[in-house]
C-alpha cells in the first residue's frame, strides 16, 4: 500500500519546511496544491520532491484541498 500526503498551500514558507520534513521519511508521495503563493512555498515543496499542482484560487481552501486529494496516487 502506498501512502500519499496531500497539502493545500498559500504563502506557507514559514511552516511548510517543517511540515514536509515531518512526513518525508514515510510518505510515498507528497502532493502540494498551491493557490498562487508569492513567497518561497513552491521552492520548499520542490526541495522535498513534492508533486506540485498550481491553482489560482488562494482563498478557496476546500477546493484546493480536494484538488490535492484528487491528485494523490496513494
Image (cartoon, helix red, strand yellow):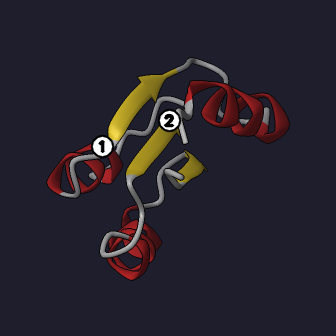
The alpha-carbon separation of the residues under discs 1 and 2 comes to 8 Å
Residue at mark 2? 34
Count every numbered label the image shows and give the total: 2
Residue 41 spot, x, y in % from top left: 34, 51
Given contact means CB atoms under 8 Å apart, are the residues at marks 1 and 2 in contact? yes
Q: Residue furthest front?
A: 1
Residue 52, above or below 31: above
Residue at mark 1? 42
Q: Residue furthest left?
A: 47
Residue 53 spot, x, y in % from top left: 45, 25
Q: Residue at x 31, y 45 (%)?
A: 50
* Quarter where residue 69 is shown: top right
* Quarter where residue 25 is shown: bottom left
Mark 1 lies on a secondary structure that is helix
The circle on residue 50 is: none
Residue 67 spot, x, y in % from top left: 67, 26
Of the 4 image quadrants, the one containing the C terminus is top right
- Viewed as shown, does residue 25 lie left or right of 71? left
Amino acid at each position: 500500500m502506498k501512502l500519499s500526503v496531500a497539502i493545500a498551500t498559500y504563502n506557507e514558507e514559514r511552516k511548510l519546511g517543517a511540515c514536509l520534513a515531518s512526513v518525508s521519511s514515510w510518505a510515498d508521495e507528497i502532493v502540494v496544491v498551491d493557490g498562487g503563493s508569492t513567497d518561497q512555498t513552491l521552492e520548499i515543496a520542490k526541495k522535498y520532491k513534492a508533486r506540485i499542482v498550481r491553482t489560482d484560487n488562494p482563498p478557496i481552501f476546500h477546493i484546493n484541498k480536494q484538488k490535492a486529494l484528487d491528485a494523490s496516487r496513494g
